[in-house]
Image: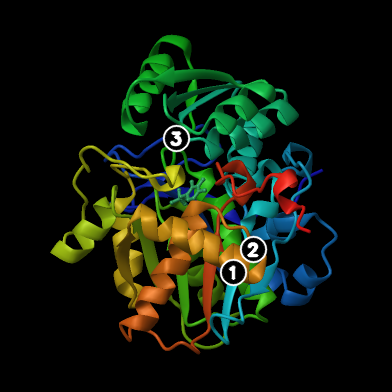
Amino acid sequence: MTVQTFATHLECSETGARYDIDRPQGLSEAGKPLLVRYDLGTLADTVSKADIATSSAPGFWRYASFLPVKEARNRVSLGEVVTPIIPLKSFGRNLTVKDEGRLPTGSFKARGLALAVSRARELGIEHLAMPTNGNAGAALAGYAAQAGLKATVFCPADTPEINIRETAAMGGTVYRVDGLINDCGKYVQQGKESQGWFDTSTLKEPYRIEGKKTMGLELAEQLDWRLPEAIFYPTGGGTGLIGMWKAFHELRELGWLEGPLPKMIAVQASGCAPIVRAWQNGARHAELWQDARTFAAGIRVPAAVGDFLILDAVRESGGWATAIDDDTIMEARDRVARQTGNLLCPEGAATFAAWEEAVGSGQISADAEAVLYNCATGLKYPLPDRAFRAEDSVTD
Ligand SMILES: *Cc1c(COP(=O)(O)O)cnc(C)c1O
């Protein structure tokens, strides 16, 4: 069955050069990410908000007309859900968290990899490979298994053990690498040349952004086609921030959005904050962050190919970039969990700390409508042992 896709071509995010969407593509000739472009005029004439509201497709597949998959049989699904927006009222009257930990494989990487794997299947690609800090590898393995494709991933040796094991459990071939994610990327590059692997690295193929774009479409629909004042996003490779910003522009061009676009706040860890440093220096590109360290593995990305796209979106939105240290992240995670019952992942907790910092410094009001992104389930991360011994409970 053919679905209605309005995707027309791919476009270099730097030069605007056009690329054929019906062939496998990586980076542009300029070495920059490719973006999917749509015939939004025809989409607007054909699809209505009501069509989306009544869609029976699971989770983000309700936005299929904003996505590049051509045939419904090529959609690879593990039962995606629309993720809830949960109020954190005891902290801020209009503060909420969008909990992406409810997605298949326990993180929002499911959105990007569902699209990348679906398009890979559609284009006849058989073997996908990527460097990963953990969650992306697990999502790749899960969706590749469902699609009957092969997945090979390279992780820094100190990647959370649970991510390494879950990836292998879902049939992915996992290698540990002495180094960081950019070192892992070199092995993928070698396998691409010698084994014919398809490189599914963040932003090095065009479809993970489209999957992450659904975070923005979904948020807009959940808020009745308006957007909050601020979005706090834990930024590693930046796919989600770039994808959401793309979603907002597409919706605005369709005339579907009411009110202004949100301020986009890129949150990093103090031990790995290349985007924050570039933001502070007024630079459009970030320099490699040496000796990157943080317990928030998902945002330990020393160099991002899409750095200029992240920085452009942050600036255009009137937002900012900020770094949070690991002690503050852990303290935030514990406090939010104790006080609200939301067990955030460290990266999600970083966005909460960034929100508190922004309220403290007057960058936003405590009552402003703000959305935090909790990118993965907190259960994937080591938790402190705070249990008592039963014997000690007996008092007489
Ligand atoms: C990948 C990841 C991030 C960063 O997301 P990007 O969109 O690639 O910047 C943040 N947190 C977690 C848990 C992740 O897995």
> How many residues crowd around disc 3 within 10 Å: few (fewer than 14), some, or many (20 or more)?
many
Quadrant of residue 31 in the image? top left
> How many residues crowd around disc 2 within 10 Å: few (fewer than 14), some, or many (20 or more)?
some
Closer to the chain start, of discs 2 and 1, is 1
> How many residues crowd around disc 1 within 10 Å: few (fewer than 14), some, or many (20 or more)?
many
For residue 342, the mark is 2
Between circles 2 and 1, the one closer to the viewer is 2
Q: What type is the residue that disc 2 sits on?
A: Asn
Name the foreground residue: 189 vs 229.
229
Left or right, 52 with respect to 122, comes to: right
Find the distance from the CA under tag 2 to the CA under tag 1.
9 Å
Residue 4 appearing in the image? no
Q: What type is the residue that disc 1 sits on?
A: Val
Tell me if label 2 and label 1 are in contact, CB under 8 Å: yes
Q: Give the secondary structure at mark 2.
A: loop
Q: Is residue 14 above or below residue 128?
A: below
Indicate the position of residue 346 as horizontal and vertical percent values. Answer: 49, 53
Q: Give the secondary structure at mark 1.
A: strand
Find the distance from the CA under tag 1 to the CA under tag 3.
27 Å
Closer to the chain start, of discs 3 and 2, is 3
